[in-house]
Image: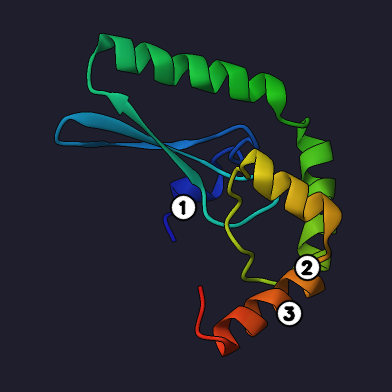
């Protein structure tokens, strides 16, 4: 490891990763509960860069302080398996289903549908 990298400040919890593709800026926002990051595609223009900067500004205001983030990371790391399912926004019908059933009930229903050859 490079000696100059040893003294670099820690990456803040509101940091996001960005890169360019042919005609767009891609921003990867880490999920608060772990799992794969949420990817945003922004136009490769002054407007897209302005949106990316606003995204950083908004994200900084949303994220916990450094100490709170470290404590939350320790709690979440201890309570969750290494491979989490990705966070996906649920539709209204999915939200209702999740509020009225348990994960075990949904798993049994999926197993039954698979057994019946339906999906």
Find residue 39 and report its horizontal and vertical position in percent: 43, 41
Q: Do the residues labelled 1 and 2 touch (CB within 8 Å)?
A: no
> Tag 3's secondary structure?
helix
Q: Quadrant of the N terminus?
A: bottom left
Q: Earlier in the sequence, mark 3 or mark 2?
A: 2
The image's colouring method is rainbow
Which residue reaches farthest bottom? 115
Label 3: how many residues lie within 10 Å, few (<14), some (14-19) or many (20+)?
few
In the displayed structure image, the side of residue 51 where residue 70 appears, left or right: right
> Which numbered circle lies on residue 3?
1
In the displayed structure image, the side of residue 30 where residue 69 appears, left or right: right
Select label 3 or label 1 by which is in front. 3
Question: Marks 1/2: CA distance?
Answer: 48 Å
Q: Earlier in the sequence, mark 3 or mark 1?
A: 1
- Above or below, 107 against 39 in this view is below
Find residue 85 and report its horizontal and vertical position in percent: 61, 63
- Above or below, 98 against 82 in this view is above
Which one is in front, 22 or 16? 22
> Which numbered circle lies on residue 108?
3
Find residue 91 and report its horizontal and vertical position in percent: 61, 42
* Residue occupying image coordinates x 59% and y 57%: 35
> Which numbered circle lies on residue 103?
2
* Residue occupying image coordinates x 77% and y 41%: 69
């Amino acid at each position: 490891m490079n000696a100059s990298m040893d003294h670099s400040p820690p990456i803040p919890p509101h940091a996001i990763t960005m890169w360019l593709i042919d005609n767009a800026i891609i921003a990867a926002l880490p999920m608060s509960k772990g799992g794969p990051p949420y990817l945003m595609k922004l136009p490769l223009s002054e407007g897209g860069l302005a949106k990316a900067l606003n995204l950083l500004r908004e994200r900084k205001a949303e994220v916990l302080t450094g100490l709170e983030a470290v404590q939350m990371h320790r709690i979440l790391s201890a309570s969750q398996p290494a491979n989490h399912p990705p966070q996906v926004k649920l539709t209204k019908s999915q939200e209702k289903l999740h509020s009225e059933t348990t994960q075990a009930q949904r798993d049994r229903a999926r197993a039954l549908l698979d057994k019946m050859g339906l999906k």
